[in-house]
Image (spheres, rainbow, N blue to C red):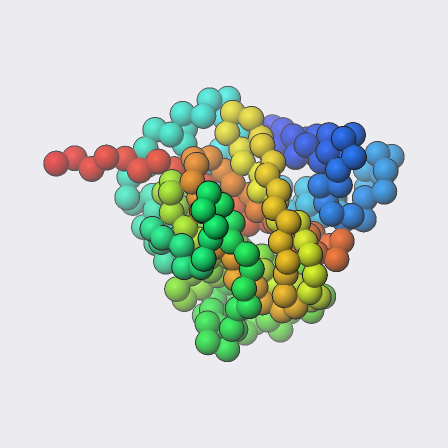
Amino acid sequence: MITGKIFLSIAVIACILTGFAYGQDWLEGGNVQSFSRPSDPGIAGMVRWLDQPVYNPSFPWYTSRDTFYQRGAPEATFSPFRQYYTTSAQRAVALGQRVSTPVKYNMSQRTPTNVYYASGQGLPYSQYASIAPSRANDLWIQGTGNWSQYVVVPVGTWLQLVATAPVSGPGGFYEITQMENATLEYNRLQFYQGYNNISFNADRAGRHMLYFVVNNEPSNVVIMDVFSQAQQKM
């Protein structure tokens, strides 16, 4: 378990540093200045979030074979997270895209009852709001009644993300997918100040880790374990 987490952190940083080598700043200027600053707050913060424990310890951080996610999971695997996914997008998404353009989220109409961290620990939203930093970028997976930083969903389903940005402006939306190898995908999005709603399509099996960067500040990471569904016996 620990070895897998270390591998993942190294793989993610390797992807970012590779981007620097080709003249790309994968953290959108996230306080990264040079290769000689391993304690940089942008990278350190990202790795800290990636190393958080997740709710279900039976799912590995890294496996040498991708068949773990492909072999088909029973309905009972997904049922605790049923409120967090649907079979179709709730927001307009361009053909072929998996991430929608952010739209303003009306918090007064869709305030969650509870929020759940990746470890499974929960708080009433009112308590979370009273202790959350007002200048922090936050990312959550929206359910019908709660928000979470970790879910298990079937391949092909859609999820609604809530991204909180203290300032408006362009930002980077990043997706790290862990299967046999770690891959990094990037979308440039325009964020509103305050609460943003983003549709995301979990179109492939694997562990997906999402975060965004606005105004040089990385958000927390949300984690999705995406499995193929086992065929039901007749």
* View extreme (top): residue: 64
Residue 173 as seen in the image, left or right of residue 124? right
Extreme residue toward the bottom, this view: 108
Q: Which residue lies furthest to the front in this view?
A: 95
Q: Is residue 9 left or right of residue 124?
A: right
Classify residue 87 as left or right of residue 186: left
Height in image: 229 above or below 64? below
**Residue 53 on image: x %, y %:** 56, 44
**Camera sees residue 119:** no
Which residue is at the front of the view, 105 or 121? 105
Where's residue 18, x and y in %? 73, 30
Residue shown at 53%/68% (left/top)?
A: 105
Location of the N terminus by quadrant is top right
Relative to residue 40, is residue 153 drawn left or right? left
**Quadrant (top left, top right, bottom left, bottom right) of the C terminus:** top left
Residue 24 in which image quadrant: top right
Q: Which of the pair 108/89 is nearer the observer?
A: 89
Q: Report x, y in % for residue 52.
A: 60, 45
The residue that appears at 45% across and 25% down in the rendered structure is: 66
Question: In this orientation, which residue lies closer to the viewer: 225 or 104?
Answer: 104
Quarter of the view holding residue 189? bottom right
Count numbered badges in the picture.
0
Q: Which residue is drawn at 58% across and 67% down?
A: 195
Residue 38 drawn at (x, y percent)? 81, 37
Q: Say if residue 206 shows up in the picture.
A: yes
Which residue sits at x=58%, y=32%?
Answer: 183
